[in-house]
Amino acid sequence: GRLTIPNTWEAKRVFVQDEQLDPVLVVQTVPKLDAKAYLYAKVTMPRGAPYMPGSVSLFRDATFVGSGHLPLLSPGQEHELGFGVDDLVIVRHAVVEEKRGETGLITSSRTDQRNFRIAVKNRHERAVQLSVRDQIPASLNQDIKVELTGKTAPTRRDIDDRRGVLAWDSEIKPEEERVVEFGYRITWPSAKPITYGR
């Protein structure tokens, strides 16, 4: 409808639209960097006009948790909003094994093997969608071989076109503990030094 804004040089807020969105809640963790779980809401923009860019206030269980910024979003486009640390999801990360050695008699090669264990426990009274993320080295040289090892195969690899980035996606029930066991083995000629990048 029409609205008259007085010429007083003061900022005035006006109601434009009320939209109910049904987000998908996902708990994400990158325990190698931070042994905490973070809550994200993934929303799909409804049909109609695009959402204009601007600031957004974030509330979790009717409690203000922070501010964010929305980009220009088209109908049908997905966007993710972060709602901070989820204290009811407990994350533990451990290096289980580190081994270095040499193999071969004539043409020897070196190996570097590491194994990790990630445990995530859900203390919510409901099931939550969980995404555990980690990484393995990515070789830029054909003489350097990187092999993914471990009991738990990732559900996604090379996330967002970033080589070596892995994800384990699942639903975790109340009081359930989900364990991810994985590692990698690097093999390269002894005569060649290698450097680990970021």
Image (cartoon, grey):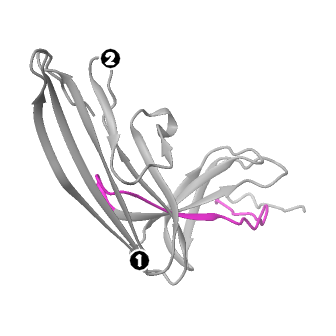
Kind of residue indicated by mark 1: Leu
The spot of residue 51 in percent (x, y) is 73, 50
The reply to whether residue 9 is in sight is no
The reply to whether residue 185 is in sight is yes
Residue at (22%, 28%) from the top-left corner?
187
Task: Please tell me whether residue 131 is drawn above or below residue 164 in the rendered image.
Answer: below
Task: Please tell me whether residue 71 is drawn above or below residue 81 in the rendered image.
Answer: above
Kind of residue indicated by mark 2: Gln
The spot of residue 43 in percent (x, y) is 66, 58
The spot of residue 62 in percent (x, y) is 57, 80
Residue at (10%, 29%) from the top-left corner?
102
Q: Quadrant of residue 9?
A: bottom right
The spot of residue 179 in percent (x, y) is 37, 64
The span shown in magenta is 10-35
Mark 1 crowdedness (10 Å alpha carbons): few <14, some 14-19, many ≥20: some
Residue 88's label in the rendered image is 1
Residue 142's label in the rendered image is 2
16 relative to 88 in the view: left or right: right
33 relative to 55 in the view: left or right: left
For the N terminus, the quadrant is bottom right
Residue at (42%, 45%) from the top-left corner?
166
Marks 2 and 1 sit apart, C-alpha to C-alpha, by 44 Å
Q: Nearer the viewer, residue 25 or 69?
A: 25
Q: Nearer the viewer, residue 193 or 63?
A: 193
**Residue 31 counted in the magenta span:** yes
Q: Quadrant of residue 29?
A: bottom left
